Amino acid sequence: MYEIIDETLKIASCSINDLTLEQASSFLSQWEDGATLGSLTLFINRETGYLVLNKDNEQYEHNLKLAKTILSASDERIEKYRSKMGGRMSETMEVANKFREYKQIQDDLKMIEHQGVALFRDHTIRNVLSSLEKKQIPTCLLMSQAYSYGVMNGKRMERARRKAVAAV
């Protein structure tokens, strides 16, 4: 259904006619109210993990260039673009930037998934995390506390490392 344009940046393209009604509705929801399929320039397909450009749009080549620029830009460069445009980027740039952020989150999640459970050899860490799990609090708060605990332990480890280096 999609033609892969850039595997590294995860850019693909398709014709509007290739979309199912469900997909079209979902993708239109990424745009401001009143957007039509004809005006759709690009959308994020979370199922495939691609930024998909509308081949039928008359600005296709421009949008492809824009998407490549945004997806390969640094955070600082994005802020420069935003400030040049008076604090608000075009909808196309906003969707491309959202995809950039989405890709970063997905990359971070992959890294987290591949972390070993070697930490759990330390009974203290395992016990603290088990205690957190047993709390009757919302999941987002639980995750925030587990994250804070991880940061706290990371700082402790770094201080211990610095102290050991200074002692030598």
Image (cartoon, rainbow, N blue to C red):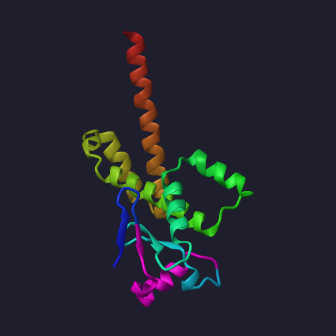
Q: Looking at the picture, tell me which residue is in the foreground, 47 or 11.
A: 11
Residue at position x 55%, y 76% from top?
Answer: 58
Q: Position of residue 53 (x, y in %)?
A: 47, 72
> In the picture shown, does residue 67 fall above or below 119?
below
Single out the residue that lies furthest toward the top: 168
> In the picture shown, does residue 48 fall above or below 82?
below
Single out the residue that lies furthest toward the bottom: 21
- Left or right, 99 with reference to 116: right
Check if residue 82 falls in the magenta segment: no
- Which quadrant of the figure has residue 118? top left
Quadrant, the C terminus: top left
- Left or right, 153 with reference to 41: left
Quadrant, the N terminus: bottom left
Q: Is residue 48 visible?
A: no
- Which quadrant of the figure has residue 21? bottom left
Single out the residue that lies furthest toward the right: 86
Residue at position x 43%, y 20% from top?
Answer: 162
> In the picture shown, does residue 101 fall above or below 95?
above
Q: Is residue 94 visible?
A: yes
Q: Looking at the picture, tell me which residue is in the foreground, 58 or 53.
A: 58
Q: Position of residue 38 (x, y in %)?
A: 56, 84
- Which quadrant of the figure has residue 76? top right
Q: Position of residue 138 (x, y in %)?
A: 49, 64
- Left or right, 106 with reference to 81: left
Q: Position of residue 94 (x, y in %)?
A: 59, 64
Q: Count the numbered circles shown.
A: 0
Residue at position x 49%, y 53% from top?
Answer: 144
Q: Which residues are magenta?
A: 12-32
Q: Looking at the picture, tell me which residue is in the foreground, 90 or 23.
A: 90
